[in-house]
Amino acid sequence: MTTPSVPLVPQHAELPHARPGPLTRPFWDGCAAGELRFQRCRACRNAQFPAAEVCRDCLGRDLAWERGAGTGTLYSWTVVHRPVTPAFEVPYAPAIVDLDEGYQMMTNLIGIAPEAITPDLPVEVEFHKTGDALYLPYFRPRATVS
């Protein structure tokens, strides 16, 4: 008889990461404020993530930051049981989420047991402080409306 695992939880230790710079600062400031921000090209309306200086679709330079709904569907995932560095607590589930605004984001899943993860799972963002100052966007199964 196998015992079901417990739901995945956010990381709590200081994690290795790049320092926010001028281009990415609006994204990280949004995370700290509980907002999932992305860029949109004003010329072609294409969503941009990660942040860029030039639109990946039309090469326009008029990009504006927008606040997203923080909802989407699970595109792909894996469950890690042997971390690359001891900074990560296992298990954790890196994932790619298709956001409703039209872009994909690499993230981690929480609030679900690894064996319960399914393709096209509806998810929503939840922000958690990791280490001293970094807020990360995690995604959990979307609450169902009855």
Image (cartoon, rainbow, N blue to C red):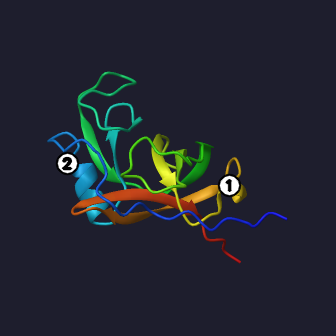
Instruction: Name the residue rendered at 23%, 30% in the picture.
Output: 53
Picture layout, residue 3 above or below residue 65 = below
Above or below 58: residue 72: below
Q: Position of residue 64 (x, y in %)?
A: 26, 43
Residue 105 pos. (x, y %): 46, 43
Q: Which mark is residue 25?
A: 2
Q: Residue at x 26, y 53 (%)?
A: 28
Residue 95 sits in which quadrant? top right
Q: Is residue 80 shown above or below 55?
A: below
| Numbered circles on residues, count | 2
Q: Residue 138 sits in which quadrant?
A: bottom left
* Residue matched to label 1: 117
- The location of residue 48, given as percent across then percent down, is 37, 37
The image's mark for residue 62 is none
Image quarter hosting the N terminus: bottom right
Q: Can you name the residue that lies furthest to the right here?
A: 1
**Circle 2 — which element?**
helix
Residue extending farthest to the top is 59
Q: Quick one: 69 or 1, which is closer to the camera?
A: 1
Work out whether 103 lies above or below 44.
below
Q: Earlier in the sequence, mark 1 or mark 2?
A: 2
Q: Is residue 61 left or right of residue 87?
A: left
Can I make out residue 99 in this image? no
10 on left or right of 72: left
Under mark 1, the amino acid is: Ile
Would you identify the image quadrant in which residue 55 lies? top left
- Under mark 2, the amino acid is Arg
* Label 1 crowd (10 A; few <14 / some 14-19 / many >=20): some
User: Where in the figure is residue 115, as x and y percent of width and height?
Assistant: 71, 56
Which residue shows up at 80% across the image and 63% down it?
Answer: 2
Q: Is residue 143 visible?
A: yes
